[in-house]
Amino acid sequence: MVQFKTIEDLGALDGKRVLIRADLNVPMQDGEVSDDTRIRSVAPTILHLMDKGAQVIVMSHFGRPKGKVVPEMSLEQLAQPLANVIKKPVVFVNDCAGDVVTDTLDAMEGDAVLLLENVRFHKGEESNDPEFAQALADNADFYVNEAFSCSHRAHASTEGIAHLLPSAAGLSLEKELTALENALGNPDRPLCAVVGGAKVSSKLDVLTNLVEKVDHLIIGGGMANTFLAAQGVDVGASLCEHDLADTARSILTKAAEQDCTIHLPTDLVVAKEFKAGAECRTISLDDVASDEMILDVGPATVAGLSDMLADCKTLIWNGPMGAFEITPFDMATVTLAKAAGALTEKGTLISVAGGGDTVAALNHAGVADQFSHISTAGGAFLEWMEGKDLPGVKVLEK
Ligand code: ADP
Ligand code: MG
């Protein structure tokens, strides 16, 4: 079990300056924050540190300014939204390092939080320049990482700085790491993974890592087509990476060697067009016409998978089972998601899911609240599923 440093390990924080790396890279629409999930997720840590008497400084990136000052990507626009969520005054300073930050901190009074300017306005952020990391560290006594979604990148604000200050995982990072560790590091078994979505090529490393670790691997979505085709199924006009047939076969071989049971669709939903209300058929594997696309896994497959899931203790899910954005091709994803949600509520299954479209699909199925843990991190969640060390997390290990 990996142990990482938590806020408790930092000791007394009264009167100390604590610099939090948050992910305030929130979606905006017409100058307004359209989804404040990421702001809300860092709020408990800010308030907890303030309770302990710390002076809290928050830093983040916003957009991709690539080492230059881009006014539209200023974090100033996040100061008021942050204040609204934490219900404390937020002071903004137009740089993230240097004397201007020191002077602002020295002049601050009461229980205000300091929000720094976009760390990516400096080239040293993404190059993890030690001098820039030191400049960030100079204005704080402690460092707290609350940006799991950025922790797969060794940047100055996620990795470099943690070598320079006593550091810890924030409350939401701690929760995320514990959930992930329970799902893949040290899981209750049988452990099942669902890997779906569009393409095998984007999730090759995920598949190769999972066959070594899970007892059951459900392959759905467009990537199932590549596996079916590799086994000689005619997939018609489906999304399929025919050039990856050898790769798919070697994953199947490796799975058999590792006692990992692979579950591929045994029946299919096909249509000639990918649009709402398109005429569709539920068919067996040998019945796809040359002008038809496989857009969802069939009901017999899903019923079998739901039964299998009832005997599992842990589930990790990335990627929808079908083209869920358009009804009725959301059937397999929604049905399996509801089964997983119900088993989790019953207390027999630990369920962890992540990925941009996966989170959207689980919201669509109405089960997001039932899952044990849903990760909103895209790239970082996938790299974790690939079994990679995340530099921003690694550096916080005890
Ligand atoms: P995530 O963002 O959760 O990692 P992906 O981006 O890998 O997931 O995959 C999601 C996409 O896969 C969706 O846009 C969905 O429509 C598509 N998809 C799923 N099944 C199929 C299929 N059978 N044919 C074509 N596209 C599919
Ligand atoms: Mg996606």
Image (tube, helix red, strand yellow):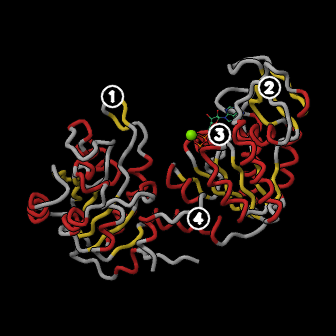
Mark drawn on residue 179: 4
Residue bearing mark 2 = 236
What element does badge 1 sit on?
loop
Q: Pinpoint residue 216: horizontal percent, then vertical percent.
A: 79, 58
**First in sequence: mark 4 vs mark 2:** 4
Classify 203 as above or below 46: above
Residue picked out by circle 3: 199
Q: Is residue 122 left or right of residue 320?
A: left
Residue with the mark numbered 1: 30
Q: Left or right? Give the position of 347 relative to 170.
A: right
Expressed as whole percent of the image width and height from the top left, the position of residue 219 reads: 75, 47
Q: Which label's residue is closer to the chain start, 2 or 1?
A: 1
Q: What residue sits 66% from the left and 46% below the top?
A: 367
On whether ligand 1 comes within 8 Å of the CB at mark 3, the answer is yes
Element carrying mark 4: helix
Ligand 2 image position (quadrant):
top right
Compared to residue 172, the image places residue 251 above or below, namely: above
Q: Nearer the viewer, residue 43 or 133?
A: 133
Task: Examine the image and state in which quarter residue 228 appears.
Answer: top right
- Residue 84 x/y as whole percent: 31, 47
Mark 1: few/some/many CA within 10 Å (<14, 14-19, 20+)? few
Q: Amino acid at mark 2?
A: Gly
Task: Compute the Cα span from label 1 to label 3.
Answer: 33 Å
Mark 1 residue CB less than 8 A from any atom of ligand 2: no
Q: CA distance from mark 2 to mark 3?
A: 16 Å
Q: Is residue 214 visible?
A: yes
